[in-house]
Structure formats: structure tokens, C-alpha cells
Amino acid sequence: MQHLLRTAVFAASLMAAPAVVFAQGGHGHSHAAPNGGQIQQIGAVEGELVVKGSDVTLFLVDEKEQKIDAAAYVATASVLAKGNQQKTVELKPAGDNKLAAKIDFPVEGKFRASLTLKKGTAEVGKARYNLDTK
């Protein structure tokens, strides 16, 4: 009987583990995107990517969700454009905690990008985004 109870507890813990990972969003995010974009962890920084029309904006915050001055940062995004073409977009400081760029090409459906964030010449990290355009 004790063996059956241990087996049941073990099985229940295995079933609960994915729920814990899902609740953390897989990236430790438990908060909503304040600007309506998608948040990803980029090294020690959180980046929220927002795409509205031809405007692409990356908002940077620290682990305490405090704005980070974006003046020393740049980002390069490899974007999947219409027709499965790869396009490169350079996001540059745009005041406050923002990096911004304009795109001059269409995308189909979702905006898919692999982004590399740098502070000066040092790479901070990489992230992938897959979000609806507005």
C-alpha cells in the first residue's frame, strides 16, 4: 500500500511539473507586457518587442522591471519578410529605455525575428520573437 501511495505521489509531481514551467512562461516572466508586445529574456535584460505598422520598438528593463537607459545599446534583428526572405533591421537608441527602427518591407502573418542585443561592442544576449503586428 505504501508503495502504491509513493507511486501516486511521484506521478502527480510529474504531471504538476509542466504546469509550473508553463506558469513561469518558460522564461521566468510572470507579468504582462506593458506596451502590448512580447517580452523575452535577453541575457540579464528583459526586452519587450512591439511592432506597429512599420515601427519596431524594443523596450529594455532590468530584472526588477525598472527601465534601463537604452543610450548605450543597439540591437540587430533578422526578420522573416514576405516570401520567406531574411531582412536585417538595426534598432538604435530612441530615448528613455527604447531602441527603435522602421521596416520598409512587408511581413506575412506574424512578425518573426531573431534579435541580438549589444551594449557597446559586448553582446548582452539573443532572443526570438514571434508576435502579431498592429
Image (spheres, helix red, strand yellow):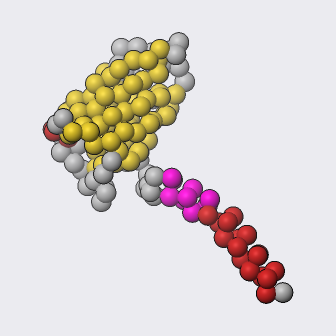
13 magenta-colored: no
Image quadrant assignment for residue 74: top left
- Residue 97 at least partly seen: yes
Q: Residue at x 35, y 20 (%)?
A: 88
Position above or below: 112 against 20: above
24 magenta-colored: yes
Q: Which residues are magenta?
A: 18-26
Number of numbered discs on residues: 0
Image quadrant assignment for residue 87: top left
- Residue 95 at least partly seen: no
Nearer to the camera, 134 or 66: 66
Position above or below: 50 against 31: above
Q: Residue at x 36, y 14 (%)?
A: 104
On-image quarter of the N terminus: bottom right
Q: Is residue 19 left or right of residue 107?
A: right
Nearer to the camera, 76 or 71: 76
Q: Is residue 16 left or right of residue 123?
A: right
Direction right: furthest residue: 1
On-image quarter of the C terminus: top left
Residue 44 point in image, percent of width and height: 30, 51
Residue 21 point in image, percent of width and height: 55, 58
Q: Residue at x 26, y 39 (%)?
A: 123
Residue 121 point in image, percent of width and height: 18, 35
Direction bottom: furthest residue: 2
Nearer to the camera, 86 or 4: 4
Q: Residue at x 33, y 22 (%)?
A: 89
Residue 29 point in image, percent of width and height: 44, 55
Is the magenta region chiefly helix, strand or loop? Answer: helix
